[in-house]
Amino acid sequence: MTAPTHTEKGRGRPRSFDEDEVLDALVALFWERGFEAASLNEIVDTSGLNKSSLYNTFGSKDELFERVLTRYMDIREATFNEAMAEGTLDALLGFVDLMRVEVEGENGGRGCLAINSSTELGLRSDSVTELSNRYRTMMRDGLRGPLERAEQAGEIDSGMARVYADVLMSFAMSTAVTVRSGAGDNEISALFDSMESLIESWRIPAVVG
């Protein structure tokens, strides 16, 4: 979506801008700094807009952050749902491996913006609480897909899909908090190794002969 052309001058920005590009830039800022620590000057500098355009387009800092968090979650949800669309336990092992690769990447220490925001603002922001609830529901439902297929294929015990999905969702959320808290590489790697071993332990051994 391209915003209407603005005629005011300032900060050397283009006369028109793409709202999604601005939101993506601000995702990076809030992901690194958090909501409270991100100053208005940092937001303005990162957005490339002047204060007037920023307020006219996105509203207050709280309203802007809601847009940023929604943008982040929409992108994550699309990627996650695609990864969970097929497969059984192999899809879950792939999910854990994807988390590991992301955490070990250059910006892995930031954790997850959705989870960071829920711990920072969830008790005082109804909109963040609502988005956090949506995020957990999305993750739980997405994880249940491969597990339900594993049940149907006889790979795991019947009736355990919901239980295992809750375990995996809790692992993903707690790992994000652990990463954000500054845990060392060895500790984080051990968490992923343990989760992969746990998933494998759910597999019913094949009967031979």
Image (cartoon, rainbow, N blue to C red):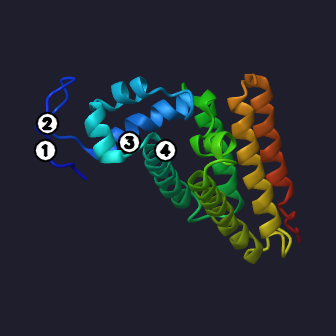
Q: Earlier in the sequence, mark 4 or mark 2?
A: 2
Q: CA distance from mark 1 to mark 2?
A: 6 Å
Q: Earlier in the sequence, mark 1 or mark 2?
A: 1
Q: Which residue is mark 1?
A: 5
Q: CA distance from mark 1 to mark 4?
A: 25 Å
Q: Nearer the viewer, residue 72 or 130?
A: 130
- The residue at 39%/40% (across/down) is 24
How crowded is the residue under tag 3: few (<14 C-alpha within 10 Å), some, or many (20+)? many
The quadrant where residue 180 appears: top right
C-beta proximity under 8 Å, tags 3 and 2: no
Q: CA distance from mark 3 to mark 4?
A: 14 Å
Q: Which residue is mark 4?
A: 62
What amino acid type should be assigned to the residue bearing mark 2? Arg
The disc placed on residue 15 is 2
Judging from the image, what secondary structure is the residue with disc 2 in? loop
Q: CA distance from mark 3 to mark 1?
A: 18 Å
Residue 155 visible at all: no
Q: Earlier in the sequence, mark 1 or mark 4?
A: 1
The disc placed on residue 23 is 3
- The residue at 54%/25% (across/down) is 106
Location of residue 11 in the rendering, given as x and y in whole percent from the top left corner: 22, 23
User: Is residue 151 shown left or right of residue 118?
Assistant: right
What amino acid type should be assigned to the residue bearing mark 1? Thr
What amino acid type should be assigned to the residue bearing mark 3? Leu
What amino acid type should be assigned to the residue bearing mark 4? Asp
User: Is residue 76 shown left or right of residue 97?
Assistant: left
Q: Earlier in the sequence, mark 3 or mark 4?
A: 3
How crowded is the residue under tag 1: few (<14 C-alpha within 10 Å), some, or many (20+)? few
- The residue at 54%/28% (across/down) is 32
Numbered disc in front, either 3 or 4: 4
Above-or-below relation of 46 to 20? above
